[in-house]
Image: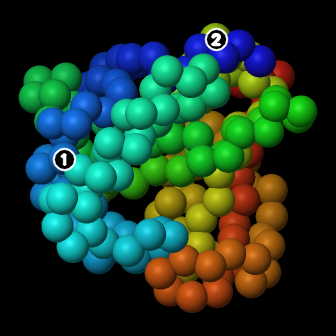
Amino acid sequence: MNKLGTKPLATERLILRPFRLDDAEDMFAAWANDPEVTRYLTWPPHGSAEITAMVLKDWVSHYGEGDYFQWAIAPRETDRVIGSISVVRLNEATEAAEIGYCLSRAEWGRGIMPEALRAVMAYLFGEVSLNRVCAAHDARNPKSGRVMEKAGMRKEGVFRQAGRNNQGLCDEVWYAALRSEWT
């Protein structure tokens, strides 16, 4: 594994870049305070932009670490953050990463998250040299699984009552891609 950390990535419509402290207001307004966005996540909606700023301060403090991967998602034309995508678990022994993501509700259904996920997967397979990239979603949130499929992941199975999120215990539906399948 190459410990390259969070490098800026670009797609046709998006810039994926490290967060900055001055992203707090946009992040709070776009998705961090939205109970619909956080419905199936493991953290509650932020009650204020100050909470979002504290989260960003923590994230930004880790950017010097080569095994830390946390991107802001921004449209090329505005550079205002509309979502985030990150490695939420990294297993160096198996060269595997678990991805987590969220996106402003105003941007849902436009193909933004599959585009961002494909860019992150290409980076993790191609430059970081990981072998496996996976993600899971609450079974009650099948649209997240569709994001994973569109990005090139395959469904592997369901772990019954294996997770807990803002809805309580949940069945986790797992998807993954391997580097050998990606190239």
Question: Dot 2 corresponds to which residue?
Answer: 127
Residue shown at 37% from the left, 34% from the top: 60
Question: Dot 1 corresponds to which residue?
Answer: 24
Q: Nearer the viewer, residue 8 or 183?
A: 8
Image position, residue 174 (x, y; %): 72, 59
Element under disc 2: loop
Q: Is residue 149 left or right of residue 29?
A: right
Residue shown at 60% from the left, 47% from the top: 88
The correct choice, above or below, for 118 with respect to 88 in the image is above
Residue shown at 27% from the left, 68% from the top: 46
Can you tell which of label 1 and label 2 is closer to the viewer?
Answer: 1
Residue 134: which quarter of the image? top right
Q: Is residue 53 left or right of residue 172?
A: left
Residue shown at 74% from the left, 83% from the top: 161
Q: Nearer the viewer, residue 107 or 62?
A: 62
Q: Mark 2: which amino acid?
A: Glu
Residue 11: which quarter of the image? top left
Q: Mark 1: which amino acid?
A: Ala
Q: Is residue 59 visible?
A: yes
Circle 2 residues within 10 Å: few <14, some 14–19, many ≥20:
few
